[in-house]
Image: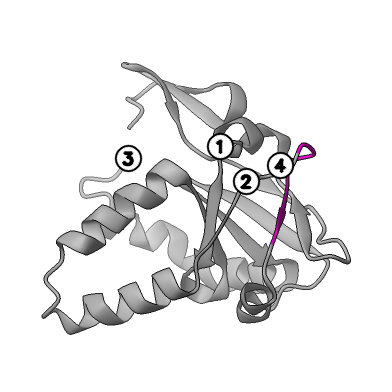
Amino acid sequence: MAEPGGSAGPGGTVRGGKGWMSMFLGTHTPRLDDKGRLILPAKFRDELAGGVVITKGQERCLYVFPGAEFGRIAEQLRATPMTHKAARAYSRVFFASAHDEVPDRQGRVTIPQHLREYAGLDRELVVIGASTRVEIWDRQAWDTYLAESEDDFAGIEEGVLPGGL
């Protein structure tokens, strides 16, 4: 993670005490075209150019992972005992809904129909950087999520970041 005093750098990276590290940041508002394609935000394209995996996320969004990050998560799930019922259930949905693709020259990826339906995607989207992944939201769903969670944001800091910022 970036150390205190880190700064934003090129292409969705953050400058910390150990140099530049990949991190997806920001909020973008692209549109879905008639063929179900999304143009990835320009600042994310270099990191995602080698290929992405798109899968179901929590709160009815989609997660977009660079191939290496998806591989890291897959390793963690493989390390979980098969006797762990919740891990089996999560793995089934996570992997069964996954779609891998290499963005085209314009930085477009096709979002399969089953994933568009899951996330309720219409033409107006919100694409957010969420550290090691990108999330794709229907614009109305994102606005609703933000309105419902904004008041809780300050209150949950202590539980997520022990000791606070």
Q: Position of residue 37 (x, y in %)?
A: 78, 58
Q: Position of residue 45 (x, y in %)?
A: 65, 36
Any mark on residue 41, and which?
A: 4
Question: Do the residues bearing badges 4 and 2 touch, measured as CB atoms within 8 Å?
Answer: no
Question: Which element type, helix, strand or loop, lies under badge 1?
Answer: loop
4 vs 1, front mark: 1
- The residue lying at 51 percent from left, 74 percent from top is 59
Taking the image as shown, residue 127 lies to the left or right of residue 83, namely: right
Mark 4 or mark 1, earlier in chain = 4
Q: Is residue 6 left or right of residue 147?
A: left
Q: Is residue 47 above or below residue 141?
A: above
Instruction: Look at label 4 and name its amino acid.
Output: Pro
Please indicate, yes or no, whether residue 131 appears anywhere in the rendered image: no
Q: Which residue type carries mark 3? A: Leu
- Residue type at tag 2: Val
Residue under the image location 83 percent in, 67 percent down:
123
* Magenta highlight on residue 79: no
* Amino acid beneath label 1: Gly
Q: Which mark is residue 50?
A: 1
Residue 96 relative to residue 2: left or right: right
Q: Is residue 140 visible?
A: yes
Mark seen at residue 102:
2
How packed mark 2 is, by other alpha carbons closer than 10 Å (few <14, some 14-19, many 20 or more), is some
Q: How is the image coloured?
A: one colour
Name the secondary structure under disc 3. Answer: loop
Nearer to us in this view, 40 or 104? 104
Q: Which region of the structure is painted magenta?
A: 105-110
